[in-house]
Amino acid sequence: MAKAKKQNPVLVPESKKLDPANMTEPVNILVVGVGGQGVIMVSKVLAQICQNLGYQVKQSEVHGMAKRGGVVFSHVRFGQQVWSPTIPVGKADVLIALEWAEGLRWMNYLRPDSGVFIADTKRIVPPFACRSRALGAEIGYSKDTPDDVKAKVCEAFAIDATEMAAKAGNERAANTLLLGALSTTLTFPTSEWKEVIARMVPPKTVDVNLSVFDQGQKWIDGSRRGEPVEGGAFVPLVQPEVNPERTMLEITAEWCKGCDICVKMCPERCLVLNKDQVAELAEPEKCTGCHICEWLCPDFAISLNPVSQEAAE
Amino acid sequence: MNKQVALKADDAKKTADGKEFNIRDYLRLDLFPHFMCPGCGHGIALRALLWAIHEQGIDKDKLAVVCGIGCSGRVGGYIDANTFHTTHGRPLAYATGLKMARPDLHVVVITGDGDCLAIGGNHLIHAARRNLDITCLMLNNEIYGMTGGQGSPTTPRDRFTTTTPAGNREPVFDACKLAEAAGAGYVGREVTIHLPRLRDLIAGGLAHKGFSFIEVMSDCTEVNGRKNDLGSSPEMVLGQTRTMRPPDYEYDSNVVDHPFRPSGLHTGVFVQSDRPEYGAAYRDMSEKLQQGRTKP
Amino acid sequence: MNSMTGQANTVNLQGNKACALGAVAAGCRFFAGYPITPSSEIAENLAKELPAVGGVFLQMEDEIASMAATLGASMGGIKAMTATSGPGFSLKQENLGYGMGAEIPCVVVNVMRGGPSTGLPTRPAQGDIMQTRWGTHGDHPVIVLAPGSVEEIYQQTARAFALSEKLRTPVIVLFDESLGHLVETVALPDVADYEKTVRKWATGKPEDYKPYHGDADGVPPMARPGDGFRVHTSGLTVAENGFPTQKPHEVDALMKRLLGKVALNNDLIESFEAVECKDAEVVIVALGVVGRAARKAVKELREAGIKAGLFRPVTLWPFPTESFRKQTAKARHIIVAEMNAGQLIHEIAEVKTGKQKVTGLNRYDGVPISPVDIKKTVKEVLGHE
Ligand SMILES: Cc1ncc(C[n+]2csc(CCOP(=O)(O)OP(=O)(O)O)c2C)c(N)n1
Ligand code: SF4
Ligand code: SF4
Ligand code: SF4
Ligand SMILES: [Mg+2]
């Protein structure tokens, strides 16, 4: 594996693709994300290909209590001989992150000298991402930009995979797009990848998945060649605004999980979910102070401030 | 016996010692946001419980919340009180020991449909029979939420779960009837969308001297909802009743049209009896024996 | 004054009743149980004793509930106990582990009968030696006291409360049917010190209190509900603040302290009886009722010129390893006499340091091992040299 060491921090020549047939140590691929994104599907496809090609594969997974927003990660190790199913810190050859902050959290698993970081810029703000849980604290979601990341690892790609997949017709195919990106780091033939993917995804979605797989491959190849690629722009997370003058209705953005209950239950339709899926009082003048949103918010994110309510009356 | 609660403008200002209910006074704020999925009904049930506790003027220091295992079991940990996260199915047994040892504490049990009716079914029957002064909230989401959506004793017919892949054929428990038959002094059921009524139902249970069993119909949006196409979180909450507008809280019939239960789901207070409370009965006996012993 | 023995304060007492009385004398004020032979007399006696001293007696719906209620009562702040036998002891395991993990003092009595399953409800056995050590899942601290007479049952039950309160952990009292139903004349030992031993209660500012931060002795003070601490108790692995954690260093620290607090307090926990071990060529290791037969056998063997000795662990777990090594230093043979197919022998084989040959003497036919059995084995062992 030491052979893979290189000086150039940006471009990986074709010849440096990982080829388990010529390696004594196993290849280590770490896939991370949050529940519901398809982390397991990525590692299953990879494991299946390795098996088809005659390598030993070990795959171990952890789901965060089977819930959306819970951390999910999967270690895939393959090669001539694989003993332990888990990848030690600093030994991952590729880190595939289906969610941006999860990717950053696991970055120390990458080989410092040769690791490749491939991440969807998709941001799902999970409860765990709140660094400070004190009331009124800013959302502690990582503010690292792709450039910050590039400085920390050997090679990094930040792709708007979810957005690109959505444009192609199925947001849920983002994981296949990342598989396309992953495929560029390995010597496995494209036909092999496509065959396995076609078998594993729901029959109706085969076409979309195969087309986003191509997109993923092209995106990495293009950006490696230094060509301008679309969909790689970084979308910073907007901090939800907190009105310093306490409004009658207060929303604790850090606690909101975007379940939409308040929005749909408000009789006056004065609440909306903003683009970060956080509830917002869009039309304060319409609010009657009926409390329905406050009472039915399962996350206690809405409070009606009685003091200002009286002031308003 | 059924209690009608109308939603009035001043409902929100119900007070204990004149103090407005602020849910944050009763939460361990440093643990928030809580771990439950977006839209999970257990959160709404927790609000109702805390509001009822506030209304009853119960001191947090004297409040003991005993939970089982499950998503429902994790709810208690967010309450700023003496909280006990016990073993699967056994919270009523733990609570029985605690209440007998410490009659001065208000003991509330939070349990789930699996926790309370499957693995803990025997304890429910006997807690109801003893009629010890405990308030038991069973958060019924008709599924095993925590373990990823297996069928529970309240999973309706034809519902898909990971252990009923072709649709459920096992009949369900009517937990309220079970508790009533076993002797619980106070029994009722409510859906989460009727929050003020749920609060009052729980408050009635807290005030009742004896075993109070309250079944809260709660939405498991993430597992049950998704697996059965029950709709988005708001759609699931809305599905609990016909309409959401405030005037509709004032209705005549106590039957909520439940889309998953064509026959209709009865809600309200079903039982309120003055069967003797076991703790008091035991202490009465004990006092007599102590006097007998100290007499020469 | 007892006319037979001439001693003050002597009574004719059954083992199970001695257990109940020892508990009450040590300050036990809560019992929850479920009837099972041969332990039921403990519950029956406490049903009479406890209400009369303002305590609580509860007959629960099963042994799982009994264990849970006992822990619930102890979390409420009072000394609590439950008692059972084999099948019931199996049912208690999950919640017993909860008590060990969440560090809740209580006493669990197991009056052993023949197994497996329903087995021999009215016959003695020692088949639960390993279950008391490893019965519940996961790594856990364990203290097991194994009295060998009615008097010792009284004393060790009382001591179990003191240890459990002091170390904030469940303590198991283990004896068998023959001792539980044995009636003998006993002088009741003074257990006032045990009665006075209560757990460390949390003091100071609630915001500074960490429910799972151990003191120098590895034991964290406990918060009593109602005292303003409002802590969280959980069966999940927790950080020092009492809330669940999965951070490897916090998990590791908790486990080290949990397992370490027993080792740290071994001087307090350890107890054993050694008879004529100093120059013994053959040391018989025997537990509980078998110790009685062994004591007689040793006496008779000595009279016959055979240098025999007895080592009887009263604290079964943690096994008094160092003392055992000292006592058997001179021996050439160790005979482990136990009423099972061979359980304690594994521990002996592991902890012995010398070249002693270890031989098992096992009976699992519901009949106690007799002095004759022991003498025969000793002679066989020596004859075969
Ligand atoms: C003895 C035991 N068996 C099984 C489990 C696994 N388990 C954890 S939660 C749960 C089901 C919880 O379902 P429910 O009580 O309905 O609560 P919910 O999560 O739906 O709120 C199970 C089976 C356990 N923790 N302990
Ligand atoms: S208080 Fe009533 S009107 Fe105002 S936002 Fe909430 S639901 Fe809408
Ligand atoms: S109900 Fe609460 S959690 Fe759901 S969207 Fe509204 S504020 Fe957010
Ligand atoms: S799995 Fe279901 S019950 Fe559990 S937190 Fe999520 S929505 Fe609630
Ligand atoms: Mg459930």
Image (tube, grey):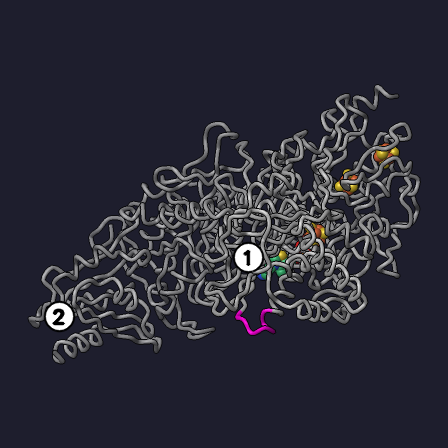
At 29% from the left edge and 63% from the top edge, which residue is drawn? C288
**Chain containing mark 1:** C
Q: Residue furthest top?
A: A311
Percent coordinates x, y for residue A134 in the rendering: 63, 31
Q: Is residue C111 above or below residue A127?
A: below
Q: Nearer the viewer, residue B116 or C324?
A: C324
Q: Secondary structure at mark 2?
A: helix
At 61% from the left edge and 74% from the top edge, which residue is drawn? A52
Q: Is residue C344 magenta?
A: no
* The magenta segment: A50-56
Q: Residues within 10 Å of mark 2 (few under 14, many from 20)?
A: some
Q: Earlier in the sequence, mark 1 or mark 2?
A: 1
Q: Nearer the viewer, residue A81 or B172?
A: A81
User: How many numbered marks does the figure carry?
Assistant: 2
Mark 2 — residue? Answer: C300
Mark 1 — residue? Answer: C65
Residue type at mark 2: give it. Answer: Glu
Residue type at mark 1: give it. Answer: Ala
